[in-house]
Amino acid sequence: MTDQPSRLRGDLGLVSVVAFGVAYMAPAVVTSIFGVIAVTSKGAAPTAYVIATGAMLLTGLSYAKMAKVHPSSGSVYTYARKELDSRVGFLAGWALLLDYLFLPMVAWLLQAIYLHAQFPAVAEWAWLVINVVLATVINVLGLKVADRINRVLLLGVTAILVVLAVLCVHYGLGHGGDAAAGHAFWNSATSISAVTAAAAVAAYAFLGFDAVSTLSEEVRDPRRTIPRAIILTVLTGGGVFIAISFLMQWAHPGASFPDENSAGYLLSTTVGGKTFADVANIVGMLGGFASCVAIQASTSRLMFVMGRDGALPRRIFGRLHRKLLTPVVNVLVIGAVGLLAMNLSLADATSFINFGAFLGFTLVNLCVIAYAVRQWRSGTRHSAVRYLLLPAVGAAVDVYLITQLGGIAVELGLAWLLIGIVWLAVITKGFRRPAPELRIEAGEAEGSTGAETSEAVVPTT
């Protein structure tokens, strides 16, 4: 036995986990990138989101299947090491770590930029520090505190989006009516190539739905709760994106904007006046803060599982605070990485994140196929459509999204993978041994809630 806790606290329910996932996705982002999606789709933003939702749902279904089979906080890292190979699992976790480490940085940097724009008396770097410190303190205290704050902030974001929706309907009815509503989905300038290209961009708004799977050890009945939460997160986020983008496109038909990057703010001003637009911007920033908290929490848990397994230095990353039962060191490391944004532009910071996310999505789909093949060989038959066709289509879509990334993002992603391969060679003695893994002795059933705080562990290599 050991006094060092090795499992996270399992007491979150379905509503809390879905709220976490939706907060991670930051639903107000639909207003921030509306102009970009509308321009790329030639004035059919909601259609782009319909396609993106369908594409992400395919991968979400694969995540749900794997979360039921492997109710552990490691997400794709755990799935790949169990279904493919321990070394592939390590590289999957390493690739996802690139996404997870820099997503908080991008989220905090966005917060600082927009808050400084509205309150220029406070320096951008000061806003960055304020956001990083607050989110870090909340995550050190634990997910129950983060859950309460996320729910409050999500209510605020939901309220402002509802008001925006009503204002867009009122404005749309007075400027074009039903005809303009139909054109919001398709018009003479729209094409299949335009909406699919826009869907590739819109898919970035879904980054983070997979973070739900990192909470498997902190929920009640993870085999049932996590799969349902993943699907509900995708559907909820997609539903919000489709509905709000439709109403905004209805209020502003076409794809002509003075500045596509600020089109959401300009449209809010048009339909509700400057005061409403300013309030909406503040509430959106609060929703963004909830996203920052969720991103930092999920990243710290991925690092904890990799540290607990020995894939990262265990004494540093694989430890929980004895009383709070949170990976405090990991939370602090992520906060420190976020502060590096003071020396980066938004474009540079953003370029880091997408490669790892879509590579991870691809591997999750492949894990489902590998699981089904292994089950068939042992005599258990699964639906070929659900366990072969849909995951194969999901993997193809994710590979396509990788091809849509810029050259810098791909180069940085490959460089990060190369570093991971070198580290993997070190810990596996030149790839001759499996990547390290931690086994938990009997006394913790595979479907455990994770409420135990101390059990015997046997590290293996």
Image: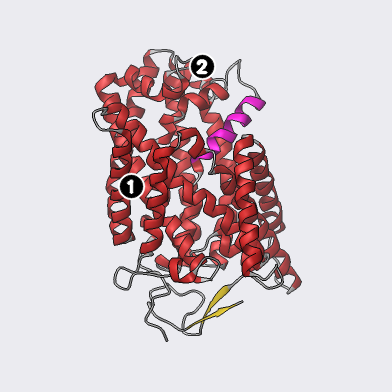
Q: Secondary structure at mark 2?
A: loop
Q: Is residue 162 visible?
A: no
Q: Which residue is mark 2?
A: 254
Query: In this image, 43 relative to 87: left or right?
Result: left
- In percent of the image, x 41 and y 70: which residue is there? 319
Query: In this image, 387 relative to 261: left or right?
Result: right
Q: Eyeballing the image, is 189 above or below 108?
A: above
- In percent of the image, x 59 and y 44: which residue is there? 355
The mark tally for this picture is: 2
View extreme (bottom): residue: 1
The image quarter in which residue 117 lies:
top left
Q: Eyeballing the image, is 376 above or below 46?
A: below
Q: Eyeballing the image, is 431 above or below 213?
A: below
Q: Quadrant of the C terminus?
A: bottom right
Q: Which residue is mark 1?
A: 132
Mark found first going from the N terminus, 2 or 1: 1
The numbered disc on residue 232 is none
Q: Amino acid at mark 2?
A: Gly
